[in-house]
Amino acid sequence: MAEVSVVEVAKGLEGVVVDQTSICLVDRATDRLYYRGYPIEEMAQLSYEAVSWLLVHGELPDAAQLEGYRSRLRELRSLPPALCMVLEQIPASTDPMEMLRSACSVLGNLEPETEERNLNEVAARLTAALPSMLLYWHHYHQSGTRIDTRSDEPTVAGHLLRQLHGKASDELLRRALDVSLIMYAEHDFNASTFTARIATSTLSDGYSAVVAALSTLRGPLHGSANANVLRFLQRFENADAAERAIPEMLAKKTRIPGFGQRAYVSADPRNAIHREWAQKLAEHSGNRALYETAERVESLLLRERRMFANLDYYSALIYHECGLPIPLFPPMFFIARICGLVAHITEQRASNRLIHPSSRYVGPPPRHVEAAQATPAQVKAAI
């Protein structure tokens, strides 16, 4: 047997640079995050539509481009009747992420990517239609209502909240959700984004790459943390109860959702922005108990274990204040991330090479079938 050189295996591809990108910089040296060179703190001052345009097109839109983009999104919110029929057949017990996976596949069949309907048009269609898909399915199975998925709301956040509540929402809620969508819009080569790039490297279509990413995001280690955060915090009667319980949980090595992020060393820069909006909403509604519990837990873990909260931690409180049911929390990640995924699909196509990593074999050495098979006499004796 030829001697095989031993190479170090980077489990989870941690620290492995697989390609270059101009879309997003996660700077571990400073714990900063940049979209196309712009710091996330400045991105939070813009609208989700402006950030979406930036990620897909590379530059911020001017006033005319932004208005044109918003107008196009309004036109694309209505769902095809055939898709509505499918949504009605998907059981109410289905995980919403699995429902969206099926819905995106159906839309990709009804409106496939072509030269006329290019990737940017697919991105606009999904950005506009995903909230409609989610809330049409939700309302149909909760109350039997077939909602009108059209709306004149100027923003994705406003449309989503109108579809959820059947009326316009408070401006503070719309803006908080808008900022949260910006926070989730892009984050380098995370698991779902890398999956989209792998699918794209095979020359697959845009819908298939997006569905591959969604299937990856479905996993509890990637896209469900915000839902788990709220379930966790709601276990405690108040902040004092949480502070008494946390040391015992740490002693038992119980995993606390919403903490840690491999891409950063000591802080997730998106968390501070989410915390600010969660606090604003708590003060606006007067329901401060949950925010105070979250803040107490965050302070304790940072002080005692140097564990820092990530972007999922306070987004759970934002979505709760917006009136979203917990099962609908994870789809917010995917709805926000469409623009980032399309940016990566575009970049992969521009300089493509089939992604095919190597592995280190640790199985049996070379062997032969004859040595493992029984002889005719042995078979006859066994009978």
Image (cartoon, rainbow, N blue to C red):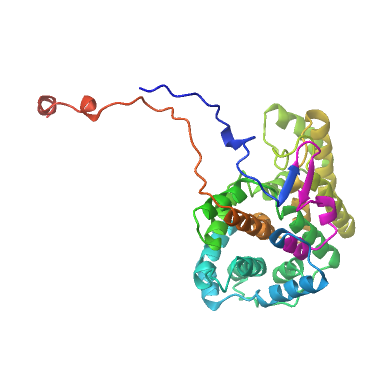
Closer to us: 242 or 222: 222
Q: Position of residue 201 (x, y in %)?
A: 53, 52
Closer to us: 70 or 144: 70
Instruction: Report the magenta residues as a range.
Output: 27-54
Furthest-front residue in this view: 351
Q: Is residue 106 above or below residue 257?
A: below
Q: Is residue 126 above or below residue 55?
A: below
Picture quarter with the C terminus:
top left
Q: Position of residue 129 (x, y in %)?
A: 64, 69
Closer to us: 263 or 331: 263
User: Any magenta on residue 237?
Assistant: no
Closer to us: 301 or 367: 367
User: Any magenta on residue 49?
Assistant: yes
Q: Is residue 103 above or below residue 265?
A: below
Q: Position of residue 187 (x, y in %)?
A: 70, 49
Can residue 331 be seen at all in this image of the molecule? no
Picture quarter with the N terminus:
top left
The residue shown at (59%, 73%) is 144
The residue shown at (78%, 66%) is 61
The residue shown at (47%, 30%) is 360
